[in-house]
Image: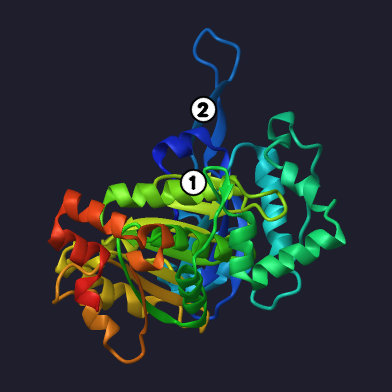
């Protein structure tokens, strides 16, 4: 059976009302957006000696659920469950939110205007937003107050990632200032499908990853991005960095994330960032639009080979999909260096000299004295990549 993507944890199941889902018939590409409750309630006869009927709450049949659509049910009988992709788009906290988000997703996806969606009727009868959810959905009300200047600014930021980064991305409450080489790298990632970036330590590449992924998620709908790190510590750092940058954006285009955990950051427009280590098995079963692989030389060769064998060939084949491999080459036989010499890869370099505060004799002397000549030459001067 085609398992759900983005299955919630048991704690999330216990604390949620339901979820919004999208089901796709893979052979035909047709889709359906709907809602489902996680729990069912039944009334049972009262216990002996009691008058009140018993209310029994248990987990619903959501794990085996394939929507209420008659067309989906017909195709399910015809082609079987493995012909479908089932995605949990978001969890909901109450019946109101379940209805509201189903409606919002259907409207945002233009399901009544698109031939690839088989939603036939959007029918909703919904009261006032519960007070507990007003602040959560405040951005919905803010949206209708946007001025023409706001709309133009949004378009400009979508078209120009450098402008967006330098005007709105803040680290420690200060606007970021990108150096020329950092700007070149961001633009080259946008312009090329397959990228290698050989970088020294402390060159700001992690921040470039975060800016690149945030820009995609804020300005593009339904894009799945995956960033693989060599360790759980690095993965956690990337997750916290992206959440922090997102939280500091103004409401004009703040990526309103409505669900995140250790492995996912999901935006209201359906785009998402998934955080993984180099485990190909754990990444099978969901489509990937953009993949960033950080420091592949610091993971096992077997894990990286499996990524190239099973994951990368399954990436979305559209021209807009990106594969970015970055980090510090570990040795002369580095897989990253070997890939950078293959035709078809866009290769960029950034070392300590490209970061003006580090391009001083004092910085070189400090690193050599603290870490040694060998570490300085390999990790900062990129000796193996030169």
Q: Is residue 295 above or below residue 342?
A: above
**Quadrant in which residue 117 is drawn:** bottom right
Q: Is residue 189 above or below residue 284?
A: below
Colour setting? rainbow
Q: Is residue 165 left or right of residue 100?
A: left
The percent coordinates of residue 202 (x first, y second) are 34, 57
Q: Which residue is mark 2?
A: 56
The N terminus sits in image quarter: bottom left
The percent coordinates of residue 383 (x first, y second) are 20, 72
- In the image, 233 versus 32, the foreground residue is 233
Q: Is residue 186 above or below residue 20?
A: below
Q: Is residue 301 left or right of residue 243?
A: left
Q: Is residue 119 above or below residue 93?
A: below
- Disc 2: CA contacts within 10 A as few (<14), some (14-19) or many (>=20): few
Determine if residue 295 is in view.
yes
Q: CA distance from mark 2 to mark 1?
A: 30 Å
Give the residue at x 39% y 68%.
354
Q: Is residue 85 left or right of residue 153?
A: left
- In the image, 54 versus 295, the foreground residue is 295
Q: Is residue 361 left or right of residue 357?
A: left
Total numbered labels placed on residues in the image: 2
- Disc 1: CA contacts within 10 A as few (<14), some (14-19) or many (>=20): some
- In the image, 33 versus 197, the foreground residue is 197
- Dot 1 falls on a residue whose secondary structure is strand
Q: Which residue is mark 1?
A: 260
Determine if residue 284 is in view.
no
The percent coordinates of residue 139 (x first, y second) are 73, 46
């Amino acid at each position: 059976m085609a398992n759900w993507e983005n299955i919630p944890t048991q704690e999330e199941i216990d604390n949620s009302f339901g979820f919004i889902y999208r089901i796709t018939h893979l052979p035909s590409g047709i889709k359906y957006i709907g809602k489902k409750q996680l729990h069912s309630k039944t009334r049972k006869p009262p216990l002996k000696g009691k008058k009140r009927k018993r209310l029994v709450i248990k987990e619903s049949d959501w794990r085996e659920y394939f929507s209420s659509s008659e067309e989906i049910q017909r195709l399910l009988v015809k082609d079987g469950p493995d012909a479908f992709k089932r995605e949990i788009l978001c969890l909901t906290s109450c019946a109101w939110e379940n209805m509201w988000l189903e409606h919002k997703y259907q409207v945002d996806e233009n399901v009544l205007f698109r031939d690839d969606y088989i939603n036939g009727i959007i029918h909703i009868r919904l009261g006032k937003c519960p007070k507990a959810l007003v602040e959560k959905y405040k951005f919905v009300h803010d949206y209708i107050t946007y001025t023409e200047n706001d709309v133009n600014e949004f378009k400009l930021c979508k078209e120009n990632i450098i402008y967006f980064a330098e005007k709105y991305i803040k680290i420690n409450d200060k606007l970021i200032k990108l150096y020329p080489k950092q700007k070149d790298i961001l633009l080259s990632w946008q312009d090329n499908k397959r990228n290698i970036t050989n970088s020294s330590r402390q060159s700001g590449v992690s921040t470039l990853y975060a800016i690149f992924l945030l820009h995609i998620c804020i300005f593009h709908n339904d894009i799945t991005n995956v960033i693989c790190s060599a360790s759980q510590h690095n993965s956690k750092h990337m997750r916290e960095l992206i959440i922090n940058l997102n939280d500091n954006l103004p409401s004009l285009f703040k990526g309103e994330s409505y669900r995140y955990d250790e492995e996912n950051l999901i935006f209201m427009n359906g785009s998402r960032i998934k955080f993984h280590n180099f485990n190909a098995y754990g990444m099978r079963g969901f489509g990937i639009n953009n993949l960033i692989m950080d420091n592949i030389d610091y993971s096992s060769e077997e894990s990286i080979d499996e990524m190239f064998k099973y994951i990368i060939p399954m990436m979305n084949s559209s021209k807009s999909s990106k594969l970015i491999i970055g980090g510090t080459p570990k040795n002369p036989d580095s897989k990253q260096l070997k890939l950078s010499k293959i035709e078809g890869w866009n290769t960029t370099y950034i070392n300590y000299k490209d970061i003006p505060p580090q391009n001083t004799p004092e910085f070189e002397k400090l690193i050599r004295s603290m870490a040694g000549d060998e570490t300085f030459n390999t990790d900062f001067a990129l000796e193996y990549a030169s």
